[in-house]
Image (cartoon, rainbow, N blue to C red):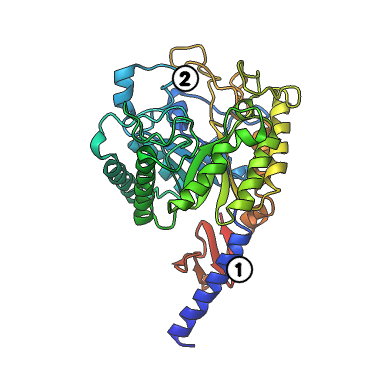
Amino acid sequence: MTLLQHFKRLLLTTLCLTCAFCVKAQHFVGGDISMLPYYETAGSTYLDNNGNAISGDLIDYLKQQGWNSLRVRLFVDPVAYRTKNGSTFWNEGARQTLDDVTALGKRIKDAGLAFMLDLHYSDTWTDPGKHLAPLGWNSSNLAAELYNYTKTVLQTLKGAGATPDFIQVGNELNCGMLWDKLYEGEASNSCYANTTGTKMDNFISYLKKGCQACREECPDAKIVFHVAMEYKTTANAASWAAKTWPQTLADKGVDYDIIGLSYYPAEHGPLNYLTTLLTYLTSHFPDKQLQLVETGYPHAYYPGGANYNYASTYPATDAGQLNFTNALLTELKKFPRVTGLYWWFPEANEYWKKNTNTQVTSGWYNSGLWDNQTGKAMKALYQLKNFRGDELTAVNRPSVSAPTTVAYSLHGHPVAATARGLYIVNGRKVIGK
């Protein structure tokens, strides 16, 4: 067989396997661990569900529980924002600089997990209600600022061995991004995807520039458009923005791969609301994968002022959180194109430092996967791996043992047969540990 014939055969095999991979895509499960380094610095000790101290890197422990992807948020200049506005409870978790994220991203990649980068494009928190433009950006040319910033971030991460596998070009973009006093990037005052107007045009230009930079610097990464469910009283209303935006982006030619969703029952309603949304997105946008990039459920007390009270069905206890998690997994498994599940703030742990001057946050988070009162891991932590299903068998399967075996990435590039990640050996997909 000539070299050209071998290449053609390899290419055909790769394309066929890639198509099969798209039909039954790899599933990613994990959480947003953006605060982990700060808890570690403060001396927090993590315990397993039996109360035993977890030795070594917590990221390795999460991998042992079947997690295979972790999310980290990034802010443009959080130090400038905190200096100007003070360290309040609201902004104290918005502290991740590029240096911080580079170091944490490298830990994630070195552990053999996928890395999701959440670009906030702000100096502080962004969500459907606010998206402040960075203090240091030129407000007269925000599209160029965003493009250049995205390029710089990705070049830095690549150079450090922390290339992201998933990139959120903005966080919870229900109402657009990069608002300043004139709200140039606010898509609409109602947070619905109106398709006309200068503000909408500005937002689309920002989004396209961010996606362009991602394609140029990280062509193998998947781009995520992130939208939150809403605070409404019916399933259709709660899903409105997440239903409307994908069509608007399609009409305007925005290049992305995954629809990312935020869903918190206390804010967004019962599980059937989520099911209604996933059913709609699955039938109307078959070219997009879906990922739940933020979710969580309380384990100690139900939050006051919640938009929806699920406590009668799933009490705010360890068992209640576990039962909600099982119910969530049952719903998600109904949709083959839902390929990602990320718990928000799983690593929250003030057990050793609570009520002291060395606390990481002013108040402890009640929906993480560690109990701030006992330091123990919650039972739900160990259940999330079931989102991956049969893939776990492949994870634990021995890698190719023959030293002469040739392995290829899904893109057709030769890799070591002992490499971590998903690759092709002898015409089949193998997941290396």
Q: Give above or below for 364 relative to 342.
A: above
Q: Is residue 208 left or right of residue 355?
A: left
Residue at screen point 62% across, 54% down: 395
- CA gap between label 2 and label 1 equals 47 Å
Residues packed near mark 1 inside 10 Å, few (<14), some (14 to 19) or many (20 plus): few
x and y percent of residue 25 in the render? 60, 57
Image quadrant holding the C terminus, namely bottom right
Considering every residue shown, the one lying at the far front of the view is 196
- Amino acid type at circle 2 is Thr
Q: Where is residue 318 in the image (x, y as percent from the top left)?
A: 70, 26
Can you give x and y, in whole percent of width and height, for residue 322 in the image? 71, 32
Residue 114 visible? The answer is no
Q: Mark 1 points at which residue?
A: 428
Which residue occupies the foreground of this view, 400 or 190?
Answer: 190
Q: Residue 226 carries which label?
A: none
Is residue 420 rendered to the left or right of residue 121?
A: right
Going by the picture, which residue comes out furthest to the right?
Answer: 313
In front of the other: 388 or 129: 129
Q: In terms of image quadrants, where is residue 274?
A: top right
Q: What residue type is labelled 1?
A: Arg
Which label number is shown at residue 361?
2
How would you rate the neighbour count of disc 2 (Cα within 10 Å): few for under 14, some for 14-19, many for 20 or more? Answer: many
Q: Which of marks 2 and 1 is nearer the N terminus?
A: 2
- Local secondary structure at mark 2: loop
